[in-house]
Image (spheres, helix red, strand yellow):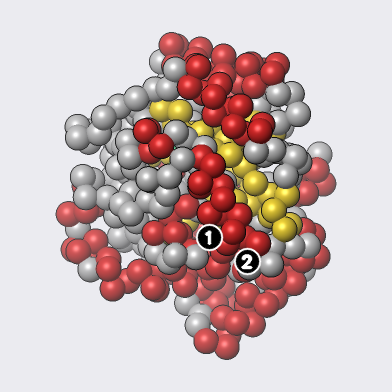
Amino acid sequence: MTILNKLQLKSLLKSSGNVQKDLFAEALLVRQKYFGNNVYLRGIIEFSNICQKNCYYCGIRKNNKSVQRYRMEMSEIEACLDFIKQANYGSVVLQSGEMLDEISKEFLLKIVQLIHQKYPELGITLSCGEFDFDFLKKLKEAGAHRYLLRIEASQKLLYEQLHPSDHSFENRVEVLKNLKKLNYQVGTGNLIGTPYQTLDDLVEDLMFFQKMDFDMFGLGPYVPHENTPLFETDYVKHWGIKKEEILNTTLNFIALLRIMMPTCNIATATALDSLHSKGRILALQAGANVIMPSVTPQSRREDYFLYQNKSSVDAGADETLDLVLDKVLEAGFIPVFGERGNAVHFCNRM
Ligand code: SAH
Ligand code: SF4
C-alpha cells in the first residue's frame, strides 16, 4: 500500500493536469484489483424530509419553513421496495432527516422488519442520523446491515462553523464508534468545498477516515441551497466560479481515499451531478465503486431538496435507473445486479 504523508496528500488534493492523471490511474489500478469494473447498485428511498436539526448547509433543515414536509406511508415505501426487487437491486438505502422521537423510531423499525421479512436477500443500509446505542442495536437485530453517517467535517472547529451550537461533534463521533461496536458496516464521509474549509482540513479528514478504519464512504461536494444560513456568506456568493475547483478536489479526494483504503466501498454522491453532467461517472473513474440511484417517487423528489440543482428531480425511479445505467455502461463499467455488494474491508475486518 502506498503511504503518503500529509504534505503529499495536500499537494495531491489540489493536483491537476498530468499529476492528477497519474493519481487517477493509480487509484483505478487499485480499484481494478479489488472490484474489477464492477459498480454496485443501491436503490435509495428518501422516505421522510422531516428533520429536527439545523445544519447550516442543508435545504431540509428544521428552520427552513418553505419546505413541504412529508413522511411516506408504509404502502408508498412498499411500492418503492417492489420496484427495487423488480429492477433487481441487491441493496436498499433508507434515508431521512433526523427524528429521535419514539413514533419516528418505531416507524423506521417497522420498515426494517418489513424489508427483512419480505426481502431477506436485500442488503439494508440506513442513513437517518444520530440514534443512541440501544436503538441502533434494535435496528441491527431487526435486520439492518449498514449505516451511513457522514462526520461532515472531522475537525471540530470546522464542524462547529457548519452547525449550530446544540449539534455535538463528540456525539457524532460517539455514534460512529457505537456503529462499529454493533458490527454494522459503517460508512462516513465529508462535505467538500464548504465555506471555512481548508486543504489541511481535508487532509485531516483522510487521516481520520483511515484511523477510524471505516468500511464505506459517501462523500461529496457542498452545493449551496438558498434557504440556508451558509448561503448568506461571501464565499457562497462566489461559489459559481469555484465549482470546477470543488469538482477536482472531490475527485482527487476519492482517488486518494481509494489508494489509502483499497478495499472500502466508496459511493458516488448525487451532488456531483450538480457540478458536472457526468459527475458520478468521473467519481467511478477516480476510484469509487458504488452508485445509489434514487427510487423515491417523483412526486416527493422536489421536497427532498438538500441542495440546489439536484439531478433527476423530474424523473421517476425507472427513468433514473435507465439514465444511470446508460452512463455507467458507456464508461465501460459493469453494473452489478442481485448482489448485496458488501464492503470487502468489512468482510476482512470481521
Ligand atoms: N439526516 C441524515 C441523512 C440525510 S442528509 C444525516 O444528516 O446524516 C444526507 C447528507 O446530505 C448529509 O450527510 C449531508 O452531507 C448532505 N447534504 C446536506 N446538505 C447538503 C448540501 N447543501 N450540499 C451537499 N450535500 C448536502
Ligand atoms: Fe437534517 Fe441531515 Fe439535513 Fe442535517 S444534513 S439538517 S441532520 S437532513
Give me the residue at 67% from left, 77% from top. 25
Which amino acid lies under the numbered mark 1 shown in the image of this protein?
Arg
On residue 103, the disc is: none
Which amino acid lies under the numbered mark 2 shown in the image of this protein?
Glu
- Indicate which label's residue lies in the foreground, 1 or 2: 2
Residue 98 can be seen, yes or no: no
How far across and how far down the image is residue 191, in percent? 43, 54
Give me the residue at 47% from left, 56% from top. 220
In the displayed structure image, the side of residue 301 where residue 12 appears, left or right = right
Q: Secondary structure at mark 2?
A: helix
Vertical position of residue 23 compared to residue 274: above or below: below
Vertical position of residue 103 compared to residue 343: above or below: above
Residue 61 figure quarter = top left
Other-residue count near label 1 (Cα within 10 Å), few / some / many at <14 / 14–19 / ≥20: many
Q: Secondary structure at mark 1?
A: helix
Residue receiving disc 1: 280
- Which of the two labelled residues, at mark 1 and mark 2, occupies the earlier sequence position? 1
35 or 77, nearer to the observer: 77
Residue receiving disc 2: 330
In the displayed structure image, the side of residue 49 where residue 1 appears, left or right = right
How far across and how far down the image is residue 272, in percent? 45, 59
How far across and how far down the image is residue 198, in percent? 39, 66
